[in-house]
Amino acid sequence: QLTDTISRLYTDPGEYVDSDHPAVEAFARAAVPRGASTREIASRLYTAVRDGIRYNPYVSMRSPESYRASSVLAAGNGYCVGKAALYAAACRVHGIPALVGFADVRNHLTTEKLRQSMGSDLFTWHGFTEVFVDGAWRKATPTF
């Protein structure tokens, strides 16, 4: 069980995980049927972000909007960090604690074009989401 302080930290809106944005709220509510369990909510939101928002690794890394959930939703595409922020924001709309995490990931399935652009198949600072479901933090990558 999470303390109230920790729970609020990961359920309140943030600058980039802007779960209070009307479009994010509408997106999160539209993806989930009434009466769904916490696990089902998290699963449906994951699928909505993974499949409904196109992965675009060529967004500007210098633009704050590439990281903001509502901006990624409005654009209809984003890269891993922005999609992770959108998934976290959508979970928070439903009161599910969620945060964005980072890891270095080797992607053996990357395209040659992206490998050439990055100079490697190592994705540094890969964004993922952690959601608190069934009493534990669960890692999820709604990227592709």
Image: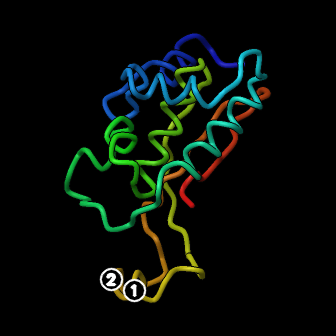
Q: Quadrant of residue 3?
A: top right
Q: CA distance from mark 2 to mark 1?
A: 6 Å
Measured along the vertical axis of the image, is residue 57 above or below residue 95? below
Q: In percent of the image, x 39 and y 27: which residue is there?
A: 23
- Pick the residue in front: 7 or 51: 51
What's the amino acid at mark 2? Answer: Ser
Q: In percent of the image, x 53 and y 39: which residue is there?
A: 87
Q: In x, y percent, where is residue 72?
A: 36, 45
Please give the label number shown on residue 117. 2
Answer with left or right where residue 115 lies relative to residue 28: left
Answer with left or right where residue 15 lies relative to residue 138: left
What's the amino acid at mark 1? Answer: Lys
Answer with left or right where residue 42 lies relative to residue 92: right
The reply to whether discs 2 and 1 touch (Cβ–Cβ < 8 Å) is yes
Answer with left or right where residue 105 lies relative to residue 18: right
Reading the image, the residue beneath label 1 is: 113
Measured along the vertical axis of the image, is residue 99 above or below residue 77? above
